[in-house]
Amino acid sequence: MSNIIVQKYGGTSIASPKRISIVARRIVGYRRKGYDLVVVVSALGDTTDDLLKLAYKITPSPSERELDMLISTGEQTSVALLAMAIHKLGYEAISFTGAQVGIITDSSHTKARIIKINTARIKRELAQKRIVIVAGFQGVDLLREITTLGRGGSDLTAVALGKVLKAKSCEIYTDVEGVYTADPRIVPQARKLQSLSYDEMLEMASLGAQVLQTRCVELAKRFNIPIIVRSSFTDKGGTMISPEAKHMEKVVVSAVTLNKNETKVTIRDVPDKPGVAAKIFKKIAQEGINVDMIVQNISRTGTTDLSFTVVKENLAKTLKAARKASKQTGGGNVIADRAIARVSVVGVGMRSHSGIAAAMFEALAENKINIEMISTSEISISCVIRKKFAQRAVRAIHKKFKLEKKR
């Protein structure tokens, strides 16, 4: 069996020289136990956000290729500093960019997908008993252009390396002790979950839980790679993400999530005729934009309002595409509503239990919070509400489903 452990450390875990030293000591502790270590790191603290702010101060619509050139530099700083911290402790370590370890991607700048990983160089260094440190979030395409894997892409780097190296485990280190029933910053009584199924974690990630990137969970599920989410600041056990969670039969709702990174776009006065919606969403899809929740109002005058949600980063492109589509189909104005949030409940137990939606809606009604859009899946229910009520909504729903930690 492989003796390789892949560890990933997020930006908060290495946000200062002191924290980098703490992480270095943790890694060395594993090395002393005889494990071969491949460590993936994100950029320090808020470096990526700071670099993006710089770019948008230069131009409101920066080239995606140049954005990748810019934001990939954050991880290059991290890997070098962590290698130095490990050297100081008397252990061999070597740092690499994504390109140097052969992470080959397609050419979709800022949201590239991994095509393959050449593990030869990593294996050579592990054979020399070195700790290998890899820049997360990045790769290189077949034309040798630097690419990035989307926000949270370091998680994807770690799981992908875990797969190709047949690692013993993949550990994701963050600033919390695992995955909780809600964001503990919003709900202090939130309970840490000992285990979650891939399906639950995938749904939570897609609905706003900022613990793991959605694509990383998809990859883990496809290749059955267990993930442990734990804190880099304590030695407490974390949350195990695996095919089936132990609590699956008992728990109906596992968690409440919140996403404030979406905008609602509405196209007014759309002709209520067959094929119009297809033309509109085809135009938007051609720009590489993923549309989420969609609501079409009832037509009473031969026209209707068509609303849908997109992530904020895609808003400018969406508005441009939607206005073209509206003009081509005879629709009216296109407006954006940035003051929304999506609150969701997630749980595999919901498949076989009735009344979950009613209880969620009741919790919102009791707090005088209006629902603007609703969507459901087999294991989740989501409501779009006003952003100003977001935290109140999370706390109310969390309490309604009795998800608090036991006293």
Image (cartoon, grey):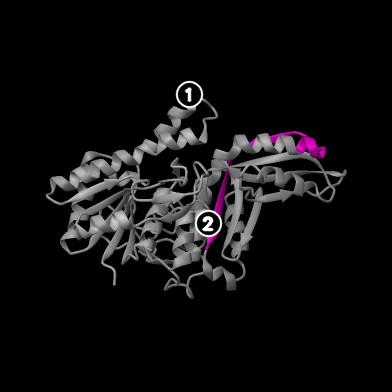
In this figure, which residue is indicated by the disc labeled 2? 397
| Quadrant of the rendered image containing residue 181 | bottom left
Residue 274's place in the image compared with 317, above or below, is below
The residue type indicated by label 2 comes to Ile
Label of residue 390 in the image: none
Q: Quadrant of the C terminus?
A: bottom left
Is residue 277 rendered magenta in the image? no
* Residue 326 screen position, x and y as percent: 76, 37
Is residue 339 rendered magenta in the image? yes
- The answer to whether residue 314 shows anywhere in this view is yes
Residue at 63% across, 62% down: 358
Check the image and name the residue furthest to the top. 58
Residue at 87% across, 44% down: 302
Foreground residue, 260 or 219? 219
Foreground residue, 111 or 389? 111
Which of the two marks, 2 or 1, is nearer to us in this view?
A: 1
Residue 283's place in the image compared with 215, above or below, is above
**Mark 2 or mark 1: whose residue is earlier in sequence:** 1
Foreground residue, 302 or 288? 288
Local crowd size for mark 1, using a 10 Å CA cut-off: few (<14), some (14–19), many (≥20): few
| Quadrant of the rendered image containing residue 34 | bottom left
* Residue 24 screen position, x and y as percent: 21, 49
Q: Secondary structure at mark 1?
A: helix
In this figure, which residue is indicated by the disc labeled 1? 58
* Residue 200 screen position, x and y as percent: 49, 63
